[in-house]
Amino acid sequence: MNLKKTMMFGTIGAALAITAFTSDKKPQNKKPENKKPAFEVSCDEFADLQVLRYQIPGFETLTPKQKELAYYLYEAANSGRDMFVDQRYRYNLTVRKTLDAILTNYKGDKTSSEWKNLVSYAKRVYFSNGIHHHYSNIKFVPTCSYAYFCSVINQIDNAKLPLGGSDKNQFLVLMKSVIFDPNFDAKVVNLGSDVDNVAASANNFYEGLTQKEVEDYYNSRISKDDLTPISWGLNSKMIKENGQVSEKVWKVGGMYSPAIEKVVFWLQKAVEVAENDKQRLALELLVKYYLTGDLRVWDDYNIAWVNDTESRIDVVNGFIEVYDDAIGKRASFESVVSIKDMEATKRIAAIAAEAQWFEDHSPILPEHKKKSVKGITAKVITVIQEAGASSPSTPIGINLPNANWIRQQHGSKSVSLGNIVKSYNTIGAKSPMMKEFCISQEEIDRNAKYGALAADLHTDMHEVIGHASGQINPGIGDPDQTLKNYASTLEEARADLVALYYVYDQKLVDMGVMPSLEVGKAEYDGYIRNGLITQLTRLQLGENLEEAHMRNRQLNASWAYEKGKAENVIEMFQKDGKTYVKINNYERLRELFGELLREIQRIKSEGDFQAAQALVEGYGVKVNQDLLKEVNIRFKKLNVAAYKGFIQPKLVPVMVNGKLVDVKVEYPNNFLQDQLDRNKKYGFLPAMN
Ligand code: ZN
């Protein structure tokens, strides 16, 4: 259950993450007459969210056949989007279809604040692919009243609503709990150490089961001696009916069949225009997997996908990341369609080419080092389309496949999402965050000069030499199974620490990928500031850390702070009632990162659950509530959105005599309308009542 994706805000060389923040809204109707208007990155803001846009530079340079392939993969991606909504929560599609019906059909007053609050709620639901916050996983409720909601629903035709078998009144009673009661199915993923992680999570992966029942079910199937273990549970829902435990597999003819049939339809078209034999084989295996639900075929597909390194167009499509399952077995649907950026790939490729050097010089114990680091291919991609778990909120780096044995025996692919990062940078250039949370002008200047590069390098190394490094002791089996709810956090911590250790290494200067160690300092400034202070802007008072990346960042930063305290490596102090951090000794901080990396690698290599629990619970979970309160006040004054996501471009085929001859790109700028369009066009799954 490694989390092989990097999210914005956090790796934060400084610039990016923290800066991915400003909202510079320009009036839409004031375009200069004879000048092509600049591409507007920001397009909407509501609650704690900002919606951005990205462009697809280079799309027009693709051959007609490559464009055709991209278009089919685009349709395959969108065809699966309903699945993710349903996976997050069993009533999500019901709520979404209800909101679709309201927004499309309501004829009453649209100027009242109640209406505006309802629209804002709808946007939040669309953004989060459901009624729980996309990042905190906690349920959010509308700011309009239930009585108002009822009055609106009562004006909508029954036939337009997803009533199922119930009448309107019964439906409204259900919606009262589902939408308006914050305690009803409060959390999608509950990683708490004192609860049943399966039963307490509201996701739609299990029904009627306890964590123990699930673990028993799989323990009897998993052999620690298996060198090519299957990712059990990855593509199914697990249910208990009449005392019997069974899996409802997501495949053609199984659960989610109406959506998967469409995905398969478009993938089969893609097979016909594949760029080469390796890509064709991979796509054929993906189709076979969706048809059979066979997880062995999924492994075969991943191996074929790793081997396809020459294609210009690439795609991630499947049930991939396991963030949404508290015990990390079941995966969420996602898709990313992309073009390889030939120029930007040179930097990341330079790091990949030195992967063995980095492994050899790593501070981890010799027995945990890979003797030969296998085929890490790294590239910068230009995203064409994202769907499911990767949209609207997106990763900025992805490293797949997830199965450890495939990574070890066949290698992995690492990508950095270049055009997404570019949009973040555009919006972040004027962030007020730096001024508020940096203690010195020197730090602000260093960030302005090197922050973007530092963040790029961090992402590159996190993906290429971070996740890909280290080896598991013989007889341990899959450490992710042993480390359970701590595996994701530690895996992210490990990858971050590799990046942190090397971003302050002369090696990178010698390689020509950064001009000086100042880049490393900028990265350390940003990482520590974020891990100890600024990432708290994402929490509400009373909350502790849940999300794996956030846990990992606090873990790394606060562990280094604690261990370096006697030597005053990192200082944390108050000035004018505001808390700041300052790094006094960058060299020593680097050593501390190295020490922690060695320990976390040991935990993973040995599958040491006790140590994993102690480390994560000790450093990565609890939040100083006084500090949180202060940060919330400071952040609120800045008036910037804490989370960002993207509206996706549209690909439009140009047909002549029923034949696709070209593909045009459109960049929608109305988030709500775009969501309504896609909900309708790709609404393949029924609501659940
Ligand atoms: Zn990662």
Image (cartoon, rainbow, N blue to C red):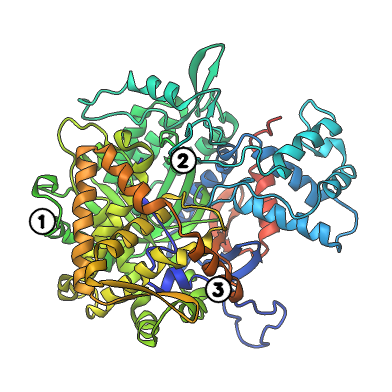
- Say which amino acid is labelled 1: Asp
Front residue of 351 and 595: 595
* SS at mark 3 in the image: helix
Left-right relation of 269 to 223? right
State which tag comes first along the sequence, 3 or 1.
Answer: 1
Mark 1 CB near ligand 1 (8 Å cut): no
Q: Residue at x 42, y 51 (%)?
A: 621
Left-right relation of 676 to 155? left
Q: Residue at x 81, y 51 (%)?
A: 145
Q: Quadrant of residue 533?
A: bottom left
- Say which amino acid is labelled 3: Arg
Q: Quadrant of residue 219?
A: top left
* Residue 479 coordinates in the image, percent (x, y): 27, 37
Work out how far the residue at label 2 is from the one at label 3, CA to CA, in angstroms: 29 Å
78 over 33 or under it: above or below: above
Residue contact between numbered discs 2 and 1, judged by CB atoms under 8 Å: no
Work out how far the residue at label 2 is from the one at label 1, CA to CA, in angstroms: 37 Å
